[in-house]
Image: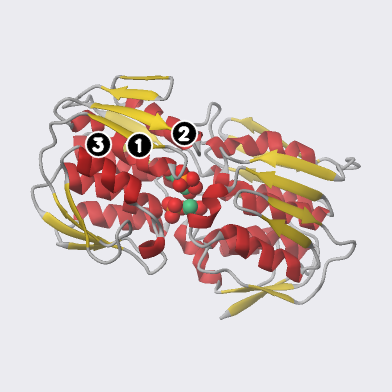
Amino acid sequence: MSIQLSVPNELISSSLSISGSKSESNRLLLLQKLYGNIQLNNISDAQDVEVMQKALANNSSTIDVHHAGTAMRFLTAYFAVTEQKSVLLTGSERMQNRPLKILVEALQKLGANIEYVKKEGFPPLQIKGKEITKNEIELSANVSSQYISALLLVAPKLAKGLKLKLKGEITSLPYLKMTLDLLKEIGVKYTFENQLIEVFPKNEIEALNYTIESDWSSASYHFSMVALAEDLELELKHFKNNSLQGDAKLVEIYLHFGVKASLKNGILKLQKQQDFQLPETIQLNLIQQPDLAQTIAVTCLGLGINCKLTGLHTLKIKETDRLQALKNELEKFGAQVEIDEQSLFLKSPKKLHADVLVKTYQDHRMAMAFAPLATKTSLKIEDPEVVEKSYPNFWKDLKKIGFSL
Ligand SMILES: O=C(O)C1=C[C@@H](OP(=O)(O)O)[C@@H](O)[C@H](O)C1
Ligand SMILES: C=C(OP(=O)(O)O)C(=O)O
């Protein structure tokens, strides 16, 4: 199935409630399971979070996380070190091709009992929980920060805590810092110096009532909408100063595209700066904000800006090979796109092609990143339900702004 997107009239300045951060929610759910007394507000309504909630709540011997990468990685560590039971942890076909070896090897070296059920290095996994008494491990940090976060989340519950030595350049660093910040929030002590993290054991915590900040990655599509629309102002609720989310960098990045963002009393206000002089070309390293790459590439296309985006080596192992998917779909609009292992070069066309069918490759961010382009040309989005993975109300919110679908 596909949907036709169009903007029949002027867009309507609106106030929207995006739900809580998917990344914060999945970390806090795991900590809640480990410690009990944590009360969560503004939890994410993403399917990836629902999957995590179900996995932690049920006693089944088979757990299917579908497409949820963070859930897969966090639950691998959780089941390996806590419960004294055997679990088959599996996921969608794509998940069975998203690598996991670095995390599994780290856990095995700590003494965990994990076996590959099909292909070495990939889910599904058969995990038999056991008590871990070793506490020192080295692992590569340049493939996915989720492996490190998974280990850190369970670390304070290990008998001797955990010392992690990180090898190589740390990718997606803000996500790792988010994990450490949340551990600090519940009173766990740690040190992080020169690629060495040490987490000290903590058995019990004081009661915590925590309000999760709304999701900045979801907000990115609204930044793009304001950048591309003739005139549009949006208000997004439940954001915080001093965000734990690296994607809050959007505020700085979208200044280049004429979007001014201000935050007051938890409300993020996005305004289009009229008569703004757009750059011809922009260059950004997104090693700390991999989930923004698709949004930014499409904003550039819509504004007729050329861009060079680097630091994207992790995109190949996400919901799809996002570099290839971006190239395929951007070119349908007339762009010239070159990709290599870690970057994307986009030369925007003078005029966008119309009546394009955008494929989404079972990737929520492909659907949501291309949607704002409907302010500039006619397009259809294939399999629009993919947005459920992180932002189930996305199409409802677009209707509210005045999109027709
Ligand atoms: O820890 C997290 O919550 C995430 C880390 C990032 O993954 P990588 O570290 O694999 O880049 C990010 O892309 C993903 O959407 C969420
Ligand atoms: C990469 C993502 O998620 P995950 O790795 O958790 O599947 C994402 O939401 O863009």
The residue shown at (48%, 60%) is: 319
Say whether disc 2 or disc 1 marks the residue closer to the N-terminus. Answer: 1
Where is residue 191 drawn, in percent x and y?
35, 18
Q: Give the position of the C terminus as an image quadrant.
A: bottom right
User: Which residue is located at x 36 percent, y 38 percent?
Assistant: 149
Of the numbered discs 3 and 1, the one sitting upstream in the chain is 1
Q: Marks 3/1: CA distance?
A: 16 Å
Residue type, numbered disc 2 = Gly
Where is residue 154? Give x, y as percent. 25, 36
Q: Is residue 99 left or right of residue 384?
A: left
Q: Is residue 257 visible?
A: no
Q: Which mark is residue 139?
A: 1
Disc 3 is placed on an element classified as helix
Numbered label attached to residue 154: 3
Question: Is disc 2's CB within 8 Å of ligand 1?
Answer: no
Query: In front: mark 3 or mark 2?
Result: 2
Beta carbon at label 1 within 8 Å of ligand 1? no
Mark 1: which amino acid?
Answer: Leu
- Front-most of 251 and 126? 126
Q: Secondary structure at mark 1?
A: strand
Mark 3 against mark 1, which lies toward the viewer?
Answer: 1
State how far apart marks 3 and 2 are (Cα): 23 Å
Which numbered marker is on residue 168? 2
Within 10 Å of disc 3 (Cα), the crowding (few <14, some 14-19, many 20+) is many
Question: Identity of the amino acid at label 3?
Answer: Val
The percent position of residue 2, horizontal first and vertical second, equals 60, 78
